[in-house]
């Protein structure tokens, strides 16, 4: 009997190929988005791990210094006087290499080959792995080593001369030799590196006499504790020793919120897809209710009926998931570029050139796809098995049952909304918990859909009747009479469109907030800085002589300047923004907390700082609190005098006066200038002149306020491009869902339409009937998406964004976003209804009646 039942289920699927294809496509798209995002995130994470491993190696601890680095005399003293071993000096920096068709970012790593053996296995013993002369590697200035694979990819060879760009300075180096990794992991690590001797790296990076850090391997025992004490007692002020994994953790924490938000958004398409599966399985049950009744009448048990439908769902799940995984791999290639570009813009230099197919990501996609499908199919399968034989033979039973359940569904929907609100109101900073709180909100809304349709169609039905007469009344009546499926289709479409409204409102609100902030902050005429590989960070410095020449230009009325540095505090990274600004620019800083009139008089001379809103949020700081900053004179406590709005970095910054900075650090370089011009000075001409001032191998960025504003917004738009892709994919899944629902209605109502045709309804009138019906469903979905979309926008702006990045944003309800939602929902429904209407209008009434 079991074999016969399974054959019967298979025959049903094969007899309805379009319904089968739509179901598979819905599952596949949902899985593809999840897999695509997961693979892209995994690829970026793997590149990040390799990047961290390439520079940290097996070191357990690192000695670090201040803004200029660590004096290399510290290494000599510890090695010779204190006999600390193993120990390796490191000079590190980001560089760019341009070839005719591509620009690639690399980590320039300066090492001592004779100290590397315990630390970086891919470099030890380096003399046996390179094709060149190791003595020349040390003795000849400007000599570098790259991997054989990198050389092949970029068309480079041994002894070639290469131009690299470092913070606006162009330096020529010679490829002394090539190095080959011993396994795939080491080859991947070497792909991101340019290797050179310590002295060469110091010269290229402008760090003569300084190291980026000293790597150490210290055992976790009593002897190790003694070694740590010796090192700490020997370090000069401004230097500190930290555990090496701290750096990796800090960098990983930067990307955590970014990854979580992308993953959560990717699940949206799958959630919409679950509505499609539920609708498909419900239709499958309804189509075979007579068949179910006959089976139950001849003794087939409830368990066997349940197993038939769940097995059918499992087959669909497996096939759709396989297709989704394959599509996800293709999608991931495009997503990887977007993810990598965003990380490079906002966080760190990350070079990801190849997609790594992670079995874990594929397994996760399979689990999510199959699990979601079976979960969506569970309720229809249970209903199929629980219907008594007599009622199973009744065509109206499903609709009668749903009508009876509407009050209970509405009550449960309200409970779910309250549950979601309760979760979101919890005083936690967890991003994952915030997204968990969104799920009951979406579920509660979907449970309210049937009752909203019933009440809405009373109003829309009157309008439709007045506009289209009897056909309009029939179209509106068919939506409520077939509520068991139309409700699911409308819910799926409205949820997808509401996500579009929510994301669109959030992005546009954020964009307008940033634009307003830029307009208030970019009041200077010209902004000058060295170029950097990470747009949001500017640790590079300008040549001091060039700075003096620019400041002395006759057209310059006044100027502000600043210095950015990054400090490692042991458990976190702290970005310091040292600022020399005149009173005319005080109003550029909009305080969220603190009194500007009291703060600014103390800013230049007192030990007082202000922090950005994200920094205050991440570290639970408020005005009056103390913040400890590691300086070259030791740890110093500064008072927080203000918290100000800033949208440059979600990691936040601590801002102090440049005079205060000079008191605690010996390094007084400038990271950037902003110029205010005298009246009548031609800004564009001065910009062009300033660009000619650096030497032939130097470059600086000279930008007007308008250009800087435009490029900042371009970076913003690029950062949110991936959310637009996810939003569009979710709507595509919903489109398939409503098409599936309309096909279900077509097949089930074929006899009803045949009777209408037999009684004189023309094909055009029937097509009009179905078009009005689909149009009403789309309009209803669009209208229903607006309140949910704005609720989602509110959650994204005031809860998700706040907990992810710490920013305060304006909430802007944009009419164009709402209008776009209505148009998208209406067009999606109308387009989805074209084929069903066309097919039904061409169906022979006699044939439809005979088949019934």
Image (cartoon, rainbow, N blue to C red):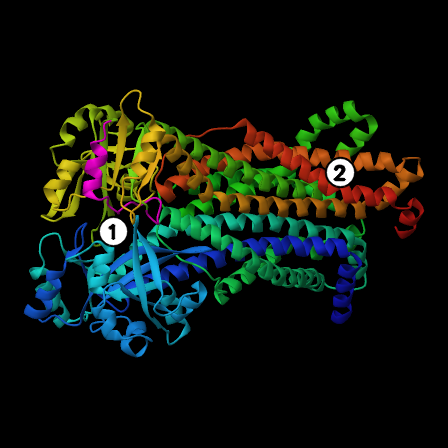
Q: Is 550 one of the magenta-colored residues? A: yes
Q: Residue at x 46, y 46 (%)?
A: 435
Q: Residue at x 25, y 74 (%)?
A: 134
Relative to 742, is 235 above or below? below
The label on residue 481 is 2
Q: Is residue 815 left or right of residue 471?
A: left
Q: Would you say the magenta stretch is mainly helix, strand or loop?
A: loop
Location of residue 8 by image quarter: bottom right
The magenta-colored residue range is 532-554
Q: Residue 75: x and y, percent?
A: 13, 64
**Residue 123 in sight from this viewpoint:** yes
**Residue 809 in sight from this viewpoint:** no
727 or 6: nearer the viewer: 727
Q: Which residue is mark 1?
A: 572
What whole-number distance in Å separates the C-alpha atoms at marks 1 and 2?
Answer: 61 Å
Earlier residue among tags 1 and 2 = 2
798 or 45: nearer the viewer: 45
Q: Residue 839: x and y, percent?
A: 83, 45
Judged by depth in the image, the label closer to the viewer, 1 or 2, is 1
Q: Residue at x 23, y 62 (%)?
A: 200
């Amino acid at each position: 009997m079991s074999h016969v039942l399974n054959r019967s289920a298979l025959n049903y699927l094969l007899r309805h190929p379009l319904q089968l294809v739509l179901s598979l496509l819905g599952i596949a798209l949902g899985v593809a988005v999840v897999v695509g995002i997961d693979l892209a995130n995994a690829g970026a994470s793997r590149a990040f791990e390799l990047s961290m491993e390439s520079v940290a190696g097996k070191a357990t601890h690192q000695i670090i210094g201040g803004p200029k680095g660590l004096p290399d005399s510290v290494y000599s003293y510890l090695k010779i006087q204190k006999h600390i071993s193993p120990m390796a000096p490191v000079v590190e920096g980001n560089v760019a290499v341009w070839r005719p068709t591509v620009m690639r970012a690399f980590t320039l790593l300066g090492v001592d080959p004779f100290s590397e053996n315990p630390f970086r296995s891919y470099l030890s013993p380096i003399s046996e792995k390179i094709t060149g002369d190791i003595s020349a590697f040390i003795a000849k200035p400007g000599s570098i080593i790259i991997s054989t694979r990198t050389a092949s990819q970029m068309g480079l060879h041994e002894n070639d001369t290469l131009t690299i760009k470092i913070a606006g300075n162009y330096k020529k180096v010679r490829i002394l030799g090539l190095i080959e990794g011993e396994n795939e992991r080491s080859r991947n690590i070497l792909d991101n590196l340019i290797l050179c001797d310590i002295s060469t790296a110091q010269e290229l990076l402008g760090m003569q006499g300084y190291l980026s850090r000293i790597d150490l391997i210290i055992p976790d025992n009593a002897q190790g504790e003694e070694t740590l004490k010796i090192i700490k007692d020997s370090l000069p002020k401004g230097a500190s020793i930290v555990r090496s994994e701290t750096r990796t953790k800090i960098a990983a924490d930067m990307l955590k919120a970014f990854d979580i938000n992308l993953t959560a958004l990717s699940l949206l398409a799958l959630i919409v897809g679950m509505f499609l599966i539920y609708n498909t399985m419900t239709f499958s049950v309804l189509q075979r209710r007579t068949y179910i009744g006959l089976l139950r009448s001849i003794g087939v048990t409830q368990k066997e009926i349940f197993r038939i439908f769940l097995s059918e769902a499992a087959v669909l799940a497996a096939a759709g998931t396989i297709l989704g995984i394959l599509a996800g791999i293709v999608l991931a290639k495009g997503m990887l570029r977007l993810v990598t570009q965003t990380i490079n813009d906002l966080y760190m230099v990350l070079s990801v050139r190849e997609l790594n197919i992670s079995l874990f990501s594929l397994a996760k996609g399979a689990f999510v796809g199959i699990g979601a499908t079976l979960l969506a199919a569970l309720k229809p399968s249970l209903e199929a098995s629980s219907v008594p034989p007599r009622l199973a033979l009744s065509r109206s039973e499903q609709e009668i049952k749903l009508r009876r359940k509407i009050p209970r569904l509405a009550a449960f929907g309200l409970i779910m909304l309250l549950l979601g609100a309760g979760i979101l109101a919890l005083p936690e900073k967890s991003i994952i918990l915030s997204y968990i709180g969104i799920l009951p909100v979406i579920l509660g809304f979907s449970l309210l859909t049937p009752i909203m349709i019933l009440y809405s169609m009373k109003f829309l039905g009157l309008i439709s009747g007045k506009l289209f007469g009897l056909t309009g009344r029939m179209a509106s009546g068919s939506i409520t009479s077939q509520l068991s499926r139309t409700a699911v289709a409308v819910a799926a479409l409205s949820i997808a469109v509401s996500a579009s409204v929510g994301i669109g409102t959030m992005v546009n609100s954020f964009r307008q907030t940033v634009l307003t902030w830029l307009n208030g902050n970019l009041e200077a005429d010209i902004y000058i800085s060295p170029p950097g590989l990470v747009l949001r960070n500017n640790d590079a410095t300008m040549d001091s002589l060039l700075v003096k020449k620019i400041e002395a230009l006759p057209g310059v009325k006044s100027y502000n300047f600043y210095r950015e540095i990054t400090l490692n505090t042991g458990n976190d990274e702290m970005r310091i923004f040292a600022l020399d600004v005149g009173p005319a620019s005080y109003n550029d800083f909009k305080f969220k907390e603190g009194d500007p009139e009291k703060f600014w008089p103390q800013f230049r001379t007192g030990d007082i700082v202000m922090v950005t809103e994200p920094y205050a949020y991440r570290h639970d700081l408020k005005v009056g609190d103390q913040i400890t900053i590691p300086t070259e004179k030791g740890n110093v406590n500064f008072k927080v005098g203000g918290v100000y709005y800033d949208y440059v970095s979600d990691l936040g910054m601590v801002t102090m006066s440049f005079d205060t900075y000079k008191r605690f650090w010996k390094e007084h370089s400038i990271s950037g200038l902003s110029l205010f011009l005298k009246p009548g000075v031609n800004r564009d001409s001065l910009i062009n002149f300033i660009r000619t001032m650096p030497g032939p191998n130097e470059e600086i960025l000279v930008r007007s306020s308008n250009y800087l504003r435009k490029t900042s917004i371009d970076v913003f738009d690029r950062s949110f491009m991936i959310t637009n892709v996810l939003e569009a994919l979710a709507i595509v899944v919903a489109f398939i869902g409503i098409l599936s629902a309309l096909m279900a209605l077509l097949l089930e109502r074929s006899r009803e339409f045949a009777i209408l045709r037999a009684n004189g309804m023309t094909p055009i009138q029937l097509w009009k009937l179905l078009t009005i019906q689909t149009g009403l469903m789309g309009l209803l979905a669009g209208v229903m998406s607006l309140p949910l979309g704005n609720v989602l926008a509110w959650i994204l702006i005031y809860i998700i964004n706040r907990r992810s990045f710490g920013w305060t944003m304006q909430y802007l309800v944009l009419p164009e976003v709402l209008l776009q939602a209505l148009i998208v929902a209406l067009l999606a429904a109308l387009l989805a209804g074209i084929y069903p209407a066309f097919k039904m209008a061409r169906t022979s009434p006699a044939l439809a009646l005979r088949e019934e």
